[in-house]
Image: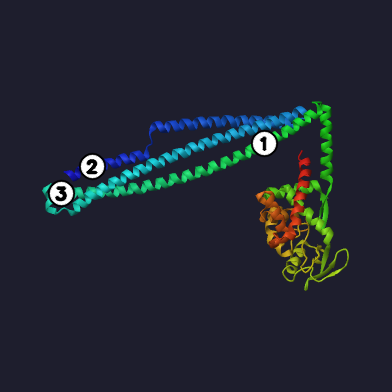
C-alpha cells in the first residue's frame, strides 16, 4: 500500500545518505592523496638537503679562520635559510590543502543534513496524515495488520533519521574543530617563515659586511688575518673589562654577558637591556651611597662609608622582617649587609645589584631559586641579581622587545607606578643610551 511504499522509499534514502557520509568520491580522495604524497616527497628531499648542508657547515666551522672559509660559511647559511623557507612554504601548502578538504567535507555534510531535514518533514507530514485519518478510512486501504505495520515502520524510520542527524551533527563539529586546528598550524607555520626570512636577511647583511672586508683586504689572506686579530683583541679587552655591580664585587664583562644571555633565554628580555639596568643602578649607587641597618626595631642605620646616621634606612616591619629572614638564610649578619640609603622623605633598604627591597625579593625568591638552582636566592650574588633584574623587567613588559616597551619597563623598574611622570624620563633615556652602548660591545663579542 502507499504508506508502505513511502516507508521503503525513505529507508532506501537513508541508506544513500549514510553512504554519502561514510565514503567520499573515490576520484577526489585519490587526487588529494596524490597531492599529499607529492608534497611529502618534496619535504623529505628538502630536509635531506638541509641536513647535508648542516654537515658541510659544521665541517667548515672546524677549519682555521680564512677568507675562503668564512665566505663558504655565509653562503651555506644563506642556502640553508632559503631551503628552510621553501620547506615551510610546502608545509603551509599541505596544511591549506587539508583545510580545503575539511571545508568541502563540511559543505557536503551540510547539504546532506538539509536533504535529511526535507525527508524528515515529508515523513512528519505523512505521519500527521495517518494521525488525522480515521481507523475506518485506514482499514479501507488494507487490513488492520497492514495499518499497524505501516505505523511501526514510520516510527522506526523516524528514530533512525533522528539518530542519523545526531551522528552527522557530531561529525560536523569534529570537522570544524579539525579545521580550527589546521588553521592554528598554518598560523604557526607562517610565523616560522617570517622568522626564517628575518634570519636570511641577517645572514645576507653579514655577507655584505664580509664583502666589504674582502674589498678592504683586496682578497689578501694576510690582510684579513690582521683584521681578525684586531677584532679579537678588541673583543678580549671588552670581555675582560670589569662590569660594575652595585653593592657587590665587579665581575668581567664577558661573565656578566654570559649570565645575561642565560637570563634572557629564560625571560625573553634582551641581554643588553638587563646589563644596562644594572649599570644604571651601579651608577646611582656611586651617587647615593650604601647603608647598614643598625636597628631592626625602627629601621635606622648609618652610611657605609660616611657613618652618617639615617632614620629610614628600612621600613618596619614590611622590610625589616624579611631582611632578617634573608640574611639568616644566607648565613650573613644583617648588620653588615649593604642596602641603599634613604633619599628625601622615602625609605632605602634595597639590596644588591638589582636593588630589590626585601619584601619584593621574598615574592621572587622561589622563582629565582628554580631558575638559578640556588637553595635560597642571594640578592648580592651577581648571577642571581642578573636573573632578578631580567624577571622584573619581563614582568614590566620588556619581553615585548620594542624600544618603547623596553624604555617603559626601565621606568617602571625605577619608579613603579610613577613611571610616567616627566621627572623620571631621564632614567629611561639614560638606560636606552646604555643599551645601545652595551649592544655595540656585544656585537663585537659575537663577531
Mark closest to the chain's N terminus, 3 or 1: 3
Q: Secondary structure at mark 1?
A: helix
- Badge 1 crowding class, 10 Å Cα cut-off, few under 14, some 14 to 19, many 20 or more, is some
| Callouts 3 and 1 close, C-beta under 8 Å | no
Residue 93 is situated, as x and y percent measured from the top left of the image, at 52, 35
Q: Which numbered marker is on residue 8?
A: 2
Mark closest to the chain's N terminus, 2 or 1: 2
Q: Residue furthest front?
A: 422
> How many numbered tags mark residues here?
3
| Callouts 3 and 2 close, C-beta under 8 Å | no
- CA gap between label 3 and label 2 equals 17 Å
Pick the front one: 50 or 101? 101
Q: Which numbered marker is on residue 145?
A: 3
Pick the front one: 414 or 97? 414
- Badge 2 crowding class, 10 Å Cα cut-off, few under 14, some 14 to 19, many 20 or more, is some
The answer to whether residue 384 is visible is no
Residue 353 is situated, as x and y percent measured from the top left of the image, at 78, 57
Q: In the visual, does 167 lie left or right of 142?
A: right
Q: Which numbered marker is on residue 201?
A: 1
Q: Secondary structure at mark 2?
A: helix
The answer to whether residue 85 is visible is yes
Specify how the rendered protein is coloured: rainbow
Q: In the visual, does 179 lie left or right of 296?
A: left
Amino acid at each position: 500500500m502507499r504508506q508502505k511504499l513511502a516507508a521503503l522509499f525513505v529507508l532506501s534514502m537513508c541508506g544513500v545518505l549514510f553512504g554519502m557520509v561514510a565514503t567520499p568520491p573515490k576520484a577526489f580522495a585519490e587526487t588529494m592523496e596524490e597531492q599529499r604524497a607529492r608534497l611529502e616527497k618534496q619535504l623529505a628531499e628538502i630536509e635531506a638537503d638541509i641536513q647535508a648542508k648542516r654537515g658541510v657547515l659544521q665541517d667548515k666551522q672546524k677549519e682555521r679562520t680564512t677568507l675562503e672559509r668564512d665566505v663558504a660559511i655565509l653562503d651555506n647559511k644563506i642556502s640553508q635559510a632559503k631551503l628552510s623557507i621553501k620547506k615551510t612554504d610546502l608545509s603551509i601548502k599541505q596544511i591549506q590543502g587539508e583545510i580545503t578538504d575539511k571545508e568541502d567535507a563540511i559543505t557536503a555534510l551540510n547539504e546532506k543534513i538539509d536533504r535529511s531535514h526535507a525527508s524528515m518533514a515529508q515523513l512528519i507530514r505523512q505521519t500527521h496524515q495517518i494521525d488525522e485519518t480515521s481507523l475506518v478510512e485506514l482499514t479501507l486501504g488494507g487490513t488492520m495488520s497492514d495499518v499497524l505495520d505501516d505505523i511501526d515502520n514510520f516510527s522506526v524510520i523516524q528514530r533512525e533519521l533522528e539518530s542519523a542527524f545526531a551522528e552527522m551533527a557530531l561529525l560536523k563539529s569534529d570537522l570544524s574543530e579539525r579545521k580550527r586546528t589546521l588553521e592554528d598550524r598554518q598560523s604557526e607555520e607562517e610565523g616560522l617563515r617570517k622568522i626564517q626570512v628575518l634570519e636570511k636577511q641577517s645572514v645576507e647583511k653579514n655577507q655584505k659586511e664580509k664583502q666589504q672586508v674582502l674589498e678592504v683586504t683586496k682578497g689578501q689572506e694576510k690582510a684579513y688575518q690582521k683584521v681578525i686579530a684586531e677584532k679579537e683583541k678588541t673583543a678580549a679587552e671588552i670581555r675582560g673589562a670589569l662590569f660594575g655591580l652595585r653593592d657587590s664585587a665587579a665581575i668581567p664583562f664577558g661573565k656578566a654577558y654570559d649570565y645575561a644571555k642565560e637570563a634572557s633565554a629564560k625571560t625573553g628580555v634582551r641581554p643588553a637591556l638587563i646589563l644596562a639596568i644594572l649599570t644604571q643602578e651601579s651608577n646611582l649607587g656611586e651617587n647615593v651611597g650604601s647603608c647598614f641597618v643598625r636597628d631592626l626595631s625602627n629601621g635606622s642605620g648609618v652610611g657605609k662609608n660616611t657613618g652618617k646616621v639615617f632614620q629610614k634606612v628600612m621600613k618596619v616591619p614590611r622590610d625589616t622582617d624579611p631582611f632578617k629572614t634573608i640574611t639568616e638564610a644566607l648565613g650573613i649578619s644583617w648588620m653588615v649587609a649593604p642596602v641603599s640609603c634613604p633619599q628625601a622623605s622615602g625609605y632605602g633598604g634595597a639590596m644588591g645589584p638589582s636593588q630589590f627591597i626585601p619584601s619584593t625579593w621574598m615574592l621572587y625568591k622561589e622563582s629565582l631559586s628554580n631558575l638559578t638552582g640556588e637553595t635560597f636566592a642571594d640578592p648580592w650574588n651577581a648571577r642571581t641579581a642578573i636573573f632578578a633584574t631580567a624577571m622584573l623587567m619581563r614582568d614590566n613588559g620588556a619581553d615585548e622587545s620594542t624600544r618603547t616597551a623596553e624604555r617603559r619597563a626601565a621606568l617602571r623598574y625605577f619608579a613603579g607606578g610613577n613611571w610616567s611622570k616627566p621627572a623620571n624620563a631621564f632614567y629611561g633615556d639614560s638606560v636606552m643610551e646604555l643599551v645601545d652602548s652595551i649592544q655595540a660591545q656585544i656585537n663585537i663579542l659575537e663577531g
